[in-house]
Image: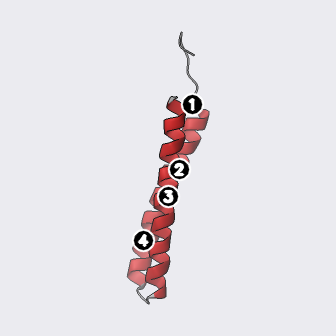
Amino acid sequence: MGRIFGFVAGLIWVGFATMAFSASSAGRGAGQPDVAFWWSVITVLYTIAATVALVGTARHRRTGPNK
């Protein structure tokens, strides 16, 4: 059950990264390079968080009596 929560958290971070990327694209389209740059930085951070959550959940192995 815990793995489900990890994957859901990772998918939520992917959603945040997608929204940040769309904000970056909108800033670029509006001719505001500073807005596009900072939203791109935020997109990268969200993508890193999503990757860590998904890969970490997939690789996590339980040990002990309650395997």
x and y percentages locating residue 26 in the rendered image: 46, 80
x and y percentages locating residue 36 in the rendered image: 44, 78
Q: Relative to the observer, which residue lies in front, 46 or 16?
A: 16
Marks 3 and 4 close (CB-CB < 8 Å): no
Kindly identify the residue that appears in the image at 51 percent across and 47 percent down.
10
Instruction: Please tell me which of labels 3 and 4 falls first in the chain.
Output: 3
Kindly identify the residue that appears in the image at 52 percent across and 56 percent down.
14
Q: Relative to the observer, which residue lies in front, 45 or 12?
A: 12
* Residue position for label 4: 39
Among the 4 quarters of the image, the one containing residue 7: top right
Indicate whether 9 appears above or below 64.
Answer: below
Q: Secondary structure at mark 4?
A: helix
Q: What numbered label is drawn on residue 13? A: none
Q: Secondary structure at mark 3?
A: helix
* Residue position for label 1: 60
| Tag 1: amino acid | His
Kindly identify the residue that appears in the image at 43 percent across and 76 percent down.
37
* Residue position for label 2: 11
Q: CA distance from mark 1 to mark 4?
A: 31 Å
Q: CA distance from mark 2 to mark 1?
A: 17 Å
Kindly identify the residue that appears in the image at 43 percent across and 84 percent down.
33
Instruction: Assess disc 1: are there few (<14), some (14-19) or many (≥20) residues with their C-alpha within 10 Å of its C-alpha.
Output: few
Q: CA distance from mark 3 to mark 1?
A: 23 Å
* Residue position for label 3: 15
Q: Is residue 50 visible?
A: yes
For the C terminus, give its image quadrant: top right
Q: CA distance from mark 3 to mark 4?
A: 14 Å
x and y percentages locating residue 13 in the rendered image: 47, 53
Instruction: Please tell me which of labels 3 and 1 falls first in the chain.
Output: 3
Indicate whether 9 appears above or below 38.
Answer: above
